[in-house]
Structure formats: structure tokens, C-alpha cells
Amino acid sequence: MARAALEWNASQLAAAAGVGVATVNRFERGGVVTTEETVTKLRVALEEAGVEFIPAGPYQGDGGAGARLRTRSGG
């Protein structure tokens, strides 16, 4: 969902994170990603692009974990 919110394809996320496209595809399918460092690279790239990850908790709606784009201030 985070990649879709940015309107990025897998190649764009891979480039931003410094990983291979196959790694992005494998991660998104729920496959094994070999290191925690790779997951961190993906998360950081998405966050730097404006994604905010929301942990599960007592929020409006169903309270499930998710992601959203940060509100951009200014005009």
C-alpha cells in the first residue's frame, strides 16, 4: 500500500532503497528477505518519500496497522 500511495513502481522503490527489484517483489509477496538491513532500507526509503507507518492500536476505524502519506504543509 505504501508504494502504491506514492505511485511508485517496484523499480522506483528498489532504486530509492538501494536494493534489487527482485528483492522488492519477494518482500511484497511475503517471501524471505535475507537481512533486517534490507527491510530497514525499504522502510527508510518509503518514509523519506513521505509514508508514515501506523502500528496497530486504538485508532479510528478498525484499529489495524497501516500506512498513509504524511500531510504536506505549505502550498
Image (tube, rainbow, N blue to C red):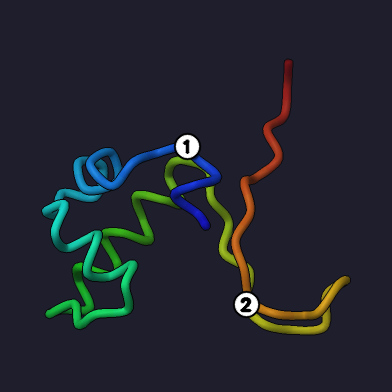
Q: Which residue is mark 2?
A: 55
Q: Residues within 10 Å of mark 2 (few under 14, many from 20)?
A: few
Q: Report the number of discs.
A: 2
Q: In which quadrant will I find the C terminus?
A: top right
> Which one is nearer the viewer's eye here, 13 or 48?
13
Residue drawn at point x = 78 percent, y = 80 percent: 63
Figure check: 54 above or below 9? below
Q: Residues within 10 Å of mark 1 (few under 14, many from 20)?
A: few
| Closer mark to the observer between disc 1 and disc 2 | 1
SS category of the residue bearing label 1: loop
Left or right? Give the position of 26 relative to 69. left
Extreme residue toward the top, this view = 75
Q: Which residue is mark 1?
A: 7
C-alpha gap between disc 1 and disc 2: 22 Å
Left or right? Give the position of 23 relative to 49. left
Residue drawn at point x = 34 percent, y = 41 percent: 9
Q: Amino acid at mark 1?
A: Glu
Figure check: 45 above or below 53? above
Figure check: 72 above or below 2? above
Residue drawn at point x = 38 percent, y = 61 percent: 43
Q: Position of residue 48 (x, y in %)?
A: 43, 45
Q: Amino acid at mark 2?
A: Pro
> Which one is nearer the viewer's eye here, 9 or 54?
9
Q: Position of residue 70 (x, y in %)?
A: 64, 45
Figure check: 62 above or below 45? below
| Label located before the other in sequence (1 or 2) | 1
Q: Position of residue 60 (x, y in %)?
A: 88, 71
Q: Position of residue 39 (x, y in %)?
A: 28, 70
Please give the label number shown on residue 40: none
SS category of the residue bearing label 2: loop
